Image (cartoon, grey):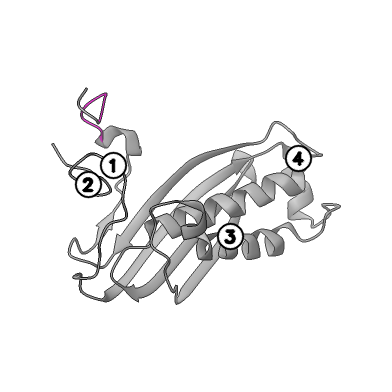
Amino acid sequence: MATFSHLNAGGEANMVDVSDKAVTVREATAQGYLYASPEVISQISNATIAKGDVFAVARIAGIQGAKRCADLIPLCHPLALSKVDVNFAIEPENNRIKTTCFCKLSGKTGVEMEALTGVNVALLTLFDMCKAIDPGMRLEGIQVLDKKGGKTGHWQRIDEPASSHIKDKNPLGE
């Protein structure tokens, strides 16, 4: 069974020492969906949301979220991101908005958490700006799509849910 890298010999949480790791180009892309009513999708498509340009605001929020990841996730290393790209695709046939966040840097640790934080903050911002129209919106499908760099190289999600990778019901083995 794999061990948790953020635990010391006594089982206490600590920050992983990455000082001996090689500096490599690291990239990660995460995505998620905001499911909303047809009315929300229509108003976003027609740029008639009363709070303004939801994509412009959510894009900046997502970028800021990725940049501030280490302030939110206690054991994440503060990283000097060289690129953050947040994008949106309206899928009216599914009453949803696909949101992606791409992060890149040259460093000693990966950027998956930054990509996940960026996509979540962007989605939460969309929710906040549209909740007066549809308080029943929901966020789903938040996941890492791919990552590159480091000793593991390139990893890409194949078309299966993340939970299918879990072999044991209790990952702590208890």
Which numbered mark, 2 or 3, is in the foreground of this view? 2
Q: In the rendered structure, which amino acid carries the disc numbered 3?
A: Gly
Q: Secondary structure at mark 3?
A: helix
As drawn, the label of residue 8 is 2
Q: CA distance from mark 4 to mark 2?
A: 43 Å
Q: In the rendered structure, which amino acid carries the disc numbered 2?
A: Asn
Q: Is residue 162 above or below residue 82?
A: above
**Which residue sits at x=21%, y=26%?**
168
As drawn, the label of residue 12 is 1
As drawn, the label of residue 62 is 3
**Which segment is the magenta one?**
166-171
Q: In the rendered structure, which amino acid carries the disc numbered 4?
A: Lys
Q: Position of residue 85 (x, y in %)?
A: 52, 68
Query: Which quadrant of the figure has residue 163?
Result: top left
Q: Are marks 4 and 3 in contact (CB under 8 Å)?
A: no
Pointer 4 or 1: first along the chain: 1
Pointer 1 or 3: first along the chain: 1
Q: CA distance from mark 2 to mark 3?
A: 32 Å
**Which residue sits at x=22%, y=46%?**
8
Q: CA distance from mark 4 to mark 1?
A: 40 Å
As drawn, the label of residue 25 is none
* Left or right position of 141 against 135: left
Q: In the rendered structure, which amino acid carries the disc numbered 1?
A: Glu
Q: Check disc 4 and report the residue beneath it.
A: 131
Q: Are marks 2 and 3 in contact (CB under 8 Å)?
A: no
Q: Main secondary structure of the magenta part?
A: loop
* Left or right position of 96 against 154: right
Q: Secondary structure at mark 2?
A: loop
Which numbered mark, 4 or 2, is in the foreground of this view? 2
Q: Secondary structure at mark 1?
A: loop
Pointer 4 or 3: first along the chain: 3
Q: Nearer the viewer, residue 104 or 16?
A: 16
